[in-house]
Amino acid sequence: MKERLEALRTEALKELEDVQNPQQLNDLRVKYLGKKGALTEILRGMGGLSAEERPVIGQVGNEVRAAIETVIEEKQAVFLQAETEGRLRAETIDVSLPGKQLPAGAVHPLNKVAQEIEDVFIGMGYTIAEGPEVETDFYNFEALNLPKDHPARDMQDSFYITDEILMRTHTSPVQIRTMKAMNGQTPVKVICPGKVYRRDDDDATHSFQFNQIEGLVIGPDIRMSDLKGTLLQFAQEMFGKQTQIRLRPSFFPFTEPSAEVDVTCAQCGGHGCRMCKQTGWLEILGCGMVHPRVLEMGGYDPNEVSGFAFGMGVERIALLKYEIDDIRHFYTNDLRFLSQFVRM
Ligand code: DAH
C-alpha cells in the first residue's frame, strides 16, 4: 500500500508539472484528492491493515496529500498572478491619448439675440409681457386701428383659423392685452417677445414664421423724445457705443406719428458699403406715438396719457449684428452654422 501511495505521488506530481490552465489544475485536484479521487480510493483500503501498519500508512497518506496539495497551491498562485498581470495589461490607460470630445450645446443665435434685446430693455426698467400666438381679429387688427380693408387682413397674407381667429401677424396685439390687463393704470413699460406668422414664401429675407419684440410705454407725459432716447440707448447697447440712429417718417395705423428707425452701418461706420447698399444706414424697426384710438381701445384716456410703441424683427437684428445673409440659416439647424455661435 505504501508503494501504491508513493507511485500515486510520483504520477500526480508528474501530471501536475504539465498542467496548462486552472481548469486542468482543478481536474487533477478532483482526480487525485477528490472524494472519489485516487488517494481516497487507496486509503479506503486501510481498514484491512494491522494496528501497527495503520498509523504508518496513515502518515504516508498524509504526506502524499500534503505534497500534492502544495504543488496545486503553487500552480494556483502562478495562474492567479498571470491572470492578474494579463488583466492589468489589458486595462492599461494611455493617458497621452486625446480625450473624447463631448460636443457642448449652445443657445440658438436667435434666442441669444432675443435675450440680448430683452436684457437691454430690462436694464431700462421694462418688464416682459406675453400673449397668445393664436389671436382674435379684434386684438390683432381691430383694436390696433387696422381698417377692415387693410392688406394684412387679407386671407392671402395671414393664416386664418376661422373668420375671427388667426395666427397673430405681429406682436402688437400684446399691446392691447397689456393695456387691458393694466386697467387704466400707469406707467406701462413692457416688451413683448414672441413668434408671429405670415403667409410669405420663404426666401433669404422672408419666413412664414419669425420672431418679433414689441415695446410699449404709457404714462402721463410720454413724448417722442423719450422714444428717440430709448431707441438710441438700445441701438448703442446692441450695435456699439458709436452707433447713431435716425427716424424717417412712416405710417402704421396704430401710431401717430409713425417712424422707421435706421442705425448707422456698423460694417462701414456710415460711409457706405455693400451691407448698407451704400447708404450708410440700416433699417431696424418701426415705431411711433400710440394712436389715440388705440389708447382708447386699451382703456386709456388719450387726453390724460400718451405713449410710444415700437416693434422689431429679431431675425433682422440678428442678421445685421452677425452679418448673416439668409434668415433660412436660422431655421435649418445646420450645425456648421450654429456652432459658430457657441462661444459668442
Ligand atoms: N407691428 C409692426 C409690424 O409687424 C411693427 C411695429 C411698428 C410695431 C410700429 C409697433 C410700432 O409697435 O409702433 O410690422
Image (cartoon, rainbow, N blue to C red):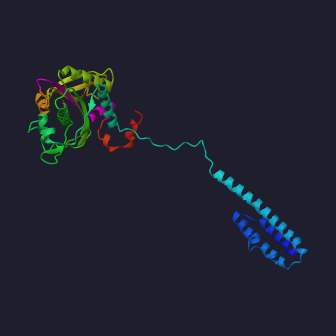
- Residue 159 percent across, percent down from the top left: 18, 45
- Residue sitting at x 82%, y 70%: 11
Whether residue 116 is in magenta: the answer is no
- Residue sitting at x 26%, y 22%: 232
Q: In the rendered view of the protein, which quadrant contains the C terminus? A: top left
Please, is residue 60 above or below residue 213 in the view? below
- Residue 186 percent across, percent down from the top left: 20, 26
Please, is residue 260 above or below residue 204 in the view? above
Which quadrant holds residue 329? top left
- Residue 60 percent across, percent down from the top left: 86, 69
Q: In the rendered view of the protein, which quadrant contains the N terminus? A: bottom right
Relative horizontal placement of residue 76, taking residue 92 as reference (left or right): right
- Residue sitting at x 17%, y 22%: 220
- Residue sitting at x 20%, y 37%: 170
- Residue 273 percent across, percent down from the top left: 29, 26
341 or 61, which lies in front? 61
Whether residue 309 is in magenta: the answer is yes
Please, is residue 171 above or below residue 94 in the view? above
Which quadrant holds residue 183? top left
- Residue 17 at least partly seen: no
Ligand 1 position by quadrant: top left
33 or 91, which lies in front? 33
Which quadrant holds residue 122? top left
- Residue 318 at least partly seen: yes
Q: Residue furthest bottom?
A: 48
Residue stretch in magenta: 302-324
